[in-house]
Image (cartoon, helix red, strand yellow):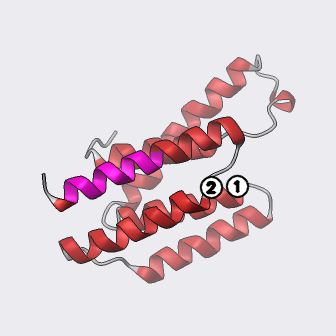
Amino acid sequence: MTIQSLINSLILLLAGWCALSDLTARRIPNVAVLLMVICAMVQSFSTGMWIDWRTAMGALVIGLALFLIGCFGAGDVKYFWACMLVVPNQIEELLITTSLAGLVLAIVYLAKHRFRPKEVDTIPYGVAISTGLALCLCRIFI
């Protein structure tokens, strides 16, 4: 097993932790995000796939603006940012897969509440982010 496989396995475990935590408590653990950033940096050094920090910081600023206007939770923003660092050469794929997973998640939540959006308080978007990341890491692109 290569170091890349070990890092990807650890990242998938962290993504599962984030999804489960967001689903049950509506919180994304800071420790999980920090470990994911560390994994991204180790991955970058081991593969030579350098992180584009300008793009990552730009996405973080956009995410924080979306948080300030109430579109996303702060945990979702920091988690998606960490995921961008993990797959620096697949950012478009991450955006698409996460968006599609988010659409499915929203439909499930609306169906669960019989299409009465007022009853849906929040949607655990960390689940969609974890799904998008897992699809990118497994090289499955829809």
Label 1 sits on what residue type?
Phe
Q: Is residue 80 visible?
A: no
| Residue placed furthest toward the right | 118
Magenta-drawn segment: 4-15
Residue depicted at x 40% and y 46%: 13
Corner quadrant of residue 58? bottom right
Q: Label 2 sits on what residue type?
A: Asp
Element under label 1?
loop
Identify the element where label 2 is drawn: helix
* Residue 111: mark: none
Q: Which residue is mark 2?
A: 76
Instruction: Identify the residue at image location x=79%, y=32%.
Output: 120
The residue that mark 1 highlights is 72
At horizontal 24% and vertical 74% (from top left) the residue drawn is 49
Marks 1/2 in contact by CB < 8 Å: the verdict is yes
The percent coordinates of residue 59 (x first, y second) are: 55, 71
Q: Main secondary structure of the magenta part?
A: helix
- Residue 24 visible in the picture: yes
